[in-house]
Image (tube, helix red, strand yellow):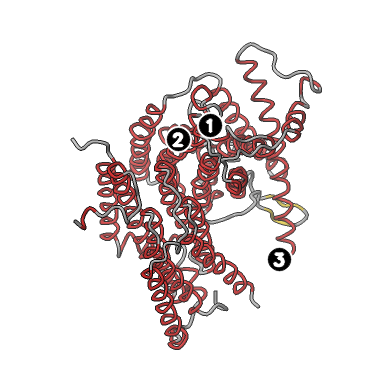
Amino acid sequence: MKIDLILFFLLAGIAVVTSILVITRRNAIISAVFLVLNFFALAGLYLLLNAQFISVVQIIVYAGAIMVLFLFVLMLLRTDNESPILSDKRPLKYFAILISVFVFVQIAYLLFAGKPSRNITPDEAASINSGTIQAIGKELYTNYIIPFEVAGFLLLAATIGALVLAKKKFE
Amino acid sequence: MSSVPMEYYLILSAFMFIVGVTGVLIRRNAIVVFMCIELMLNSANLSLVTFSSYLGNPIGQIFVFFVMTVAAAEAAVGLAIIIAIFRNKLTVNIDEINIFKW
Amino acid sequence: MSILEIIVISLIKILLVVIVMLTTVAYLVYFERKISAWAQNRIGPNRVGFHGLLQPFADVFKLLLKEDIVPDAANRPLHTLAPFIALFVSFATYAVIPFGPSVNIFGYDIKLVVADVNIGILYVLALTSLGVYGITFAGWSSGSKYSLLGGVRSSAQMISYEVSMGFSIAGVLLLSESLRPIDIVNAQHGWMWNAIVQPIGFITFVVSAFAETNRLPFDLPEAEPELVGGYHTEYSSFKFAGFFLAEYANMIIASCLIVTLYLGGWQNPLVDISGLTGTVATLLYVASFLFKVAFMLFFFIWVRWSIPRFRYDQLMNLGWKVMFPLALVNIIWVAALIMIFNL
């Protein structure tokens, strides 16, 4: 086996296990911890895909900022543990899980039967080149400058919105 | 990279997306539901990076960049809303936040 | 170079850096006590060994022989994990700090940095943003209100100051046009140190570094009069030693970063004009790096024993209303310099 195949299975295994643990743990903070681990596995997968910039940004933005925000709110609110997920015996939940599994099997079947990789010949050099900060920066500040500005405006709006919403009194 | 078929990444992405959907459907804590949405966004990011890398084109990764911006904005506003709700109802259980049903 | 040679050289470098690090941390604690004694007109530790030089070892033994207590209300796995996260984050950052120019030993051309990564500064930012987790988990998992308040305070503080830290670094990156630490050092050739070219950015970065390392005057997360010990109230023995070690390791890392980004790294204009070359020059360069780091460490300790602690709202006001706009002004200043002088 090639080293990158082994690494892929290792990281994918971590991603699968942690994503399941996120939705099955009763304590919300433990869920958040596993979600952070999941993001780390994803950052590793991005490195395997030669996307070094996105990999580091994944850690800075998701693990370093968004999840800290979640943990912060969880610790402030001190929510109680939920009851075990399927203890309330609601048929609707079993139905939801059934449909999820069904949809996943469909997608997996389509992917294996359709083989989208048939039409793609991976080019290692182009792939490494496209993941560098230079390539992304050049594309971002030339062809995608307007979406970039809009994204900046969106963040400004979100900041103001969050401040207004979380403030104690509306005046 | 070249010895891992592209389908593997896509299936992993699909799996994470489905787990996120299931989480949204079966969990009752609003913050956990939020985290499941982050999980779904991340699985979409994984597909985008996979295609970008296998096609040797940085545009997919630029999309991931924008998705992250939106996710950050969404987390900030969403958590602010949850805090505001918690102040009024003292709970974040989405079964008990049903005032719009009346 | 073959793969084996690269691995052996990397291992030697890692070993060297870790050993130097651990000794520095041990003696940093000693010097902190000595300098505080000097600042307060006392003598300080002088019983164990010559002038108390063996004091660090006595301290370590005392800590390790203590009983390891985990509170009943604690969440055991996270309680154990937290100090290791803190330690890992502070040690992993050293990998990208260049402490000298390339040297030629036994025919091998060796760069004096553990890992020469081309996104090194982003790597440092990623790791500092993870440093929050150790403290947050410690605060929450202890199951004590003092720990929780300390943890919440520290996460808010570190996130706030990361912003101005990142913006100060942006000014440096504008000049160096690279995220590789070696390029950043090389861009500060001669007296073109970033501390001289962009003094505002230097000040905001140093203040943010103080806040990031939770040192006085910003040690709100562990303010004794109000929070007992803050996030490590419920820690003892080996795990407490982990946090203690991480705090001092963070101090060294912050000093190394300040030197690399703003004080010219290992560069020394005096060695440049003296015309020395070869091994002597290299040794002088490494020595000037160590001297600068030592000075910054002294500065850290000096400030701790001179300035009282901020109040929490003052800390947040300073971070968001003073440091952040100043960092933005710095970016405009650097951009204007580049426009006018074509740097």
Q: Secondary structure at mark 2?
A: helix
Rendering coords of residue B54 (x, y %):
46, 76
Q: Amino acid at mark 3?
A: Ile
Q: Answer yes or no: do the residues labelled 3 and 2 have beta carbons within 8 Å?
A: no
Give me the residue at 28% from left, 49% from top.
A158
Q: Which residue in the structure is indicated by mark 1?
A: C230
Classify A43 as above or below C153.
Answer: below
Q: Which residue in the structure is indicated by mark 3?
A: C3
Camera-near label (3 vs 2) is 2
| C287 sits left or right of A13 in the view | right
Give me the residue at 69% from left, 53% from top.
C110
Q: Earlier in the sequence, mark 3 or mark 1?
A: 3
Q: Secondary structure at mark 3?
A: helix
Rendering coords of residue A36 (x, y %):
49, 55
Chain where mark 2 sits: C
Where residue B64 sits, quadrant-wise, is bottom left
Chain where mark 1 sits: C
Q: Which mark, residue C96?
A: none
Q: Is residue A18 visible?
A: yes
Q: Which residue in the structure is indicated by mark 2?
A: C153
Q: Amino acid at mark 1?
A: Gly
Where residue C319 sits, quadrant-wise, is top left
Q: CA distance from mark 3 to mark 1?
A: 47 Å
Task: Indicate the quadrant containing the C terminus of chain A: top left, top right, bottom left or bottom right.
Answer: top left
Classify C204 as above or below B7.
Answer: above
Neighbour class for label 3 at 10 Å: few (<14), some, many (≥20)? few
Neighbour class for label 1 at 10 Å: few (<14), some, many (≥20)? many
Q: CA distance from mark 3 to mark 2?
A: 46 Å
Give me the residue at 49% from left, 74% from top.
B9
